[in-house]
Amino acid sequence: MGYVLLDISEEGCATITLNRPEKMNAINKQMVQELREVLESVRTLETLKLVLITGAGDRAFCAGGDLKDFHGEMAAREAYELLVPMKEVLYKIATLPVPTIALLNGQARGGGCEIATACDFRYGVSDASFGFVQGDLGIRPGWGGGVLLYERIAAAQAAHWLMDAEMYEAAETLRIGWLHKMGTLEQLQSGRFIESFLNKTETQMRQFKSQYLSSLSIKGLSDRMDEEVKECAVLWESEEHKLAVQKFMSSRKN
């Protein structure tokens, strides 16, 4: 069983599941490669109407990058080379030819929020919390998710969340427009929230997505995301980031 699972329904819905529930679905190097392969295969499916991205279990959608792989002891160039493949994953998600929904089955933090933000829409459990916490680790979003956040919600709200670096309750993320729907885990997993997507034709959904992409600042998006990764990589070698990672790793051992 892999770290990334793919299930395709007869109705034309592809469900991609981050499958490391014992690690709160934190992203490791192997998952990056599996995500790239899964997204490439999904892009070629002509009968597809919708892509869902979710996490295994009921604790977390994704806790960000696994610090065993995305640790603090790296120079800027090394950090960039480690981060940029996941930026490419987020860009692939953002530009898929069909709508994408992040089904947030639990909390998302850091890179987990970046993955969710790469999706067109976000549905989450009402008792979860979500946060771009990178600012408290001496860095900024490192997969291009900060750039995407400005495409998803109002600029002032995006800037405040990134600088605040706090975990927000689901109701607050619904208020600022990041979350689109919330409910119980049972409701999210029942499929009732996506029925309205699946009763359309493949052509309709692709046209809707194409129109949506044309309304966004897609031109130069990859370059802007890449610039964010480079700037994060510079912060990666800072003492503030190294100390923050060491503190977090020590707390996990205690």
Image (cartoon, rainbow, N blue to C red):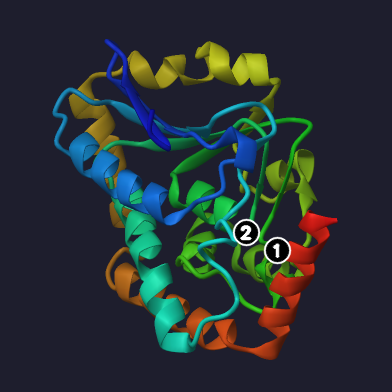
User: How far across and how far down the image is residue 194, in percent?
Assistant: 46, 20
Q: Quadrant of residue 229?
A: bottom left
- Identify the residue position indicated by label 1 in the image: 133
- In the picture provided, is 217 more to the left or to the right than 108? left
> Residue, x 70% and y 71% (percent of image)?
245
User: How far across and how far down the image is residue 92, in percent?
Assistant: 30, 52
User: How far across and how far down the image is residue 47, in percent?
Assistant: 17, 23
| Residue 22 seen from this side | yes
Q: Amino acid at mark 2?
A: Gly
> Residue, x 23% and y 35% (percent of image)?
42
> Residue, x 46% and y 65% (percent of image)?
143
- Give the alpha-carbon distance from disc 2 to disc 1, as whole Å: 5 Å
- Identify the residue position indicated by label 2 in the image: 110
User: How far across and how far down the image is residue 241, in percent?
Assistant: 67, 80
Q: Which part of the image, by quadrant, shows the C terminus?
A: bottom right
- In the picture provided, is 40 more to the left or to the right than 53? left
As helix, strand or loop, the secondary structure at mark 2 comes to loop
Crowd band around label 1 with a 10 angstrom C-alpha radius: few (<14), some (14–19), many (20+): many
Disc 2 and disc 1 in contact, CB within 8 angstroms? yes
Q: Nearer the viewer, residue 144 or 215?
A: 144
In the picture shown, does residue 140 fall above or below 88?
Answer: below
| Residue 212 seen from this side | no
Q: Which part of the image, by quadrant, shows the N terminus?
A: top left
Q: Nearer the viewer, residue 204 or 80?
A: 80
Q: Amino acid at mark 1?
A: Val
> Residue, x 55% and y 58% (percent of image)?
65
List the single residue furthest toward the front.
253
